[in-house]
Image (cartoon, helix red, strand yellow):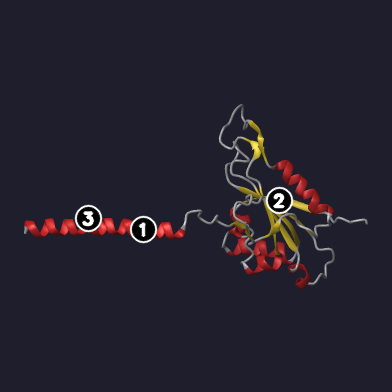
Amino acid sequence: QVVVQLPRRGEVVPEGLLFGSTSAHVELRRKLIEDYELLAVVSLPAGVFKPYAGVKTGVLVFRRPESAGKEKKEKKQGKVWFYEVRNDGFDPDKIQGGGRPETPEKNDIPDLLARWTEYRTSGFKKAPGVEGGTLLKAESEDPRCWWTTAKAIVENDYNLAAGRYKPQVAEKAPEEDPAQLIREVLETEREIEGGLEKLLKEVEAGE
């Protein structure tokens, strides 16, 4: 099977553009969804461009629709992939010799590239990760990537912040016996009640 890839374009933008509420911000995001095919939003950690700039940024990857007359309904059924880069292989805080020292043990870029290759190979039809908003089982690994539909983005005022659609990990149920917890609470309340009664007697005796 031969997959024909249309030209893609990537733009680094300030993170505020992804969720800003001004009319200009919303209109720009609307155009990306309505007039183009937004393929991916990559969230970058703060400090990526230090020492030149410390603002948090993101990368938008998009392309023109396969045909100029592509139905909006079909476009809104498409998926937008999100990837959260937490570490880019360089120390986010230190500056040495005009740049940031490398931290190869903390680098999400290789995984990002591997997942992007997987996504691209599918013709941008199968986005890696789980659907945005999914509640994952307790103790699941915090996801690095997920996807949502263009329709969901439209319904959220074209918000493109990765965290807006990030799947959540359920909290682990407490291992303590509920009955024992209730007993402990009752015991604490009895101690408080006893202390208040003693204090009341002392106050009354002093009147």
Q: CA distance from mark 2 to mark 1?
A: 56 Å
Give the mark nearest the N terminus, 3 or 2.
Answer: 2
Give the mark nearest the N terminus, 2 or 1.
Answer: 2
Residue topped by disc 2: 11
Image quarter hosting the N terminus: bottom right
Which label number is shown at residue 137? Answer: none
Within-10-Å neighbours for mark 2: few <14, some 14–19, many 20+:
few
SS for callout 1: helix
Within-10-Å neighbours for mark 1: few <14, some 14–19, many 20+:
few
Q: Nearer the viewer, mark 3 or mark 2?
A: 3
- The percent position of residue 30, horizontal first and vertical second, equals 67, 65
Instruction: Establish if 54 lies above or below 40.
Output: above
Instruction: Establish if 86 lies above or below 145.
Output: above
Residue topped by disc 3: 195
* Residue ID at (77%, 49%): 116
Residue topped by disc 1: 185
- The percent position of residue 140, horizontal first and vertical second, equals 63, 52
For the question of whether residue 83 can be seen, the reply is no
Q: Pointer 2 and pointer 1: residues touching (CB < 8 Å)? A: no
- The percent position of residue 189, horizontal first and vertical second, equals 30, 59
Count of picture labels: 3
